Amino acid sequence: MQDFISKLPKAELHLHIEGSLEPELMFKLAQRNNISLKYKSVEEIRNAYQFHNLQSFLDIYYEGAGVLQKEQDFYDLTWEYLLRCKEDNVRHTEIFFDPQTHTDRNIPFDVSINGIHAALKDGEKKLGITSHIIMCFLRHLSQEEAFKTLEHAIRHKDKIIGVGLDSSEVGHPPVKFQQVFEKAMAEGFKTVAHAGEEGPAEYIWEALNLLKVERIDHGVRCLEDEKLVAYLKEHQIPLTVCPYSNVKLKVFENLKDHNLRNLLNKGLVAMINADDPAYFGGYLGENFVGTQKALDLSKEELKTLAKNSFKASFLSQDVKDKFYKEIDSL
Ligand code: HPA
Ligand code: ZN
């Protein structure tokens, strides 16, 4: 199965680039930028990665991002992720970045976007991996702050395909960002949002109806609302599911309890993603392998997951068709 999984071409649609910051690179960048970390070793950092919910992860994740200072740091972070993509046969990736995590530390918006974008361009040239950038608003901050961030994104429209919504979900419903999403759409950005990870099915409805999203990130709690499931199926709204993340953040107790197969059986466009691989214990290939084992997924189901990853992407129909063909031939 591992061999079959490696051969499957895959797209990744739910990956926070700051969540691919490995402890080794964190140490290297801390040294390069004269920043002192509270951890003494890579092992100590890894041992600190014990989470009991989303917030306990976010606290550590935002702290870790503090070592990212210069354009080169963002380049190196993104390049390391792309090398992992190559290993896992990820052919296309649509990555999130969180500019407010950096602008709030006085790192200019242009530093993060330019570093990430330069690495992605090199990834296409040297590794043959295509990509898009989605900029996320931090939902624990105000809509006013999101509007300021959107102004920066507008200056970089040529590099950013869409906007998303991430960070602490419960207590920060999609409606809080309705106006800024309206403006983003008027400016030509696509929209996605994290919803139904820890938050209720109602937040998924809001993301669909108010933010007009084309995809729901996570969305695993949709099964609590039958009408919502029918809607997601009818409109083929993709769910970017992240199995390892869901277990690490206690959305499901064990991988065996994950509802991914149920989502597929209900005719939903779900696929596998890594979310924050440096923190959750595995990149896309590992998420596939581990989830296949835990749920005993068949080759047909794995093919459906890989096809769904392209179907749900922002690639053109032509390119999607090429990948479907390649997957069908396996
Ligand atoms: N959920 C919300 N915010 C995030 C996540 C997530 O899974 N990963 C990084 N920021
Ligand atoms: Zn996420």
Image (spheres, rainbow, N blue to C red):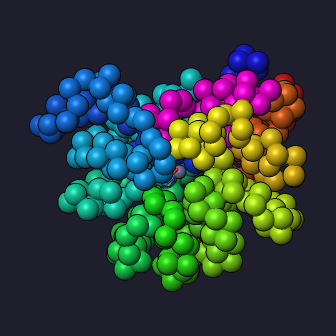
Q: Image point 42% across, 31% down: which residue?
A: 80
Coordinates of residue 138 in the picture (x, y in percent): 42, 64
Residue 224 drawn above or below residue 290: below
What residue range appears in magenta? 272-296
Left or right for 298, reference 20: right
Q: Residue 233, located in which quarter of the rendered image?
A: bottom right
Q: How many numbered discs, if any? A: 0
Q: Which image quarter: residue 321?
A: top right
Q: Residue at x 19, y 36 (%)?
A: 37
Give whichever of 121, 329 is nearer the camera.
329
**Location of residue 143 (image quadrant):** bottom left
Q: Considering the image in quadrants, where does the C terminus appear? A: top right
Is 243 drawn above or below residue 41 in the view shown? below
Pinpoint residue 139: horizontal percent, then vertical percent.
Answer: 45, 67
The overriding secondary structure of the stretch rendered in magenta is helix
Residue 186, position as x, y percentages in the image: 56, 80
Relative to residue 188, is residue 294 depicted above or below? above
Please tell me whether residue 282 belongs to the stretch shown in magenta. yes
Q: Position of residue 249 (x, y in %)?
A: 52, 44
Q: Is residue 293 left or right of residue 126?
A: right
The stretch drawn in magenta includes residue 87: no
**Residue 73 vs residue 126: left or right?**
left
Q: Nearer the viewer, residue 144 or 328?
A: 144
Q: Tell whether 328 sits left or right of 191.
A: right
Residue in the picture at 48% in, 51% down:
54
Residue furthest to the bottom: 179
15 or 157, nearer to the observer: 15
Residue 322 at least partly seen: no
Residue sitting farthest toward the left = 34
Res 271 seen here: yes
* Point 68% across, 66% down: residue: 201
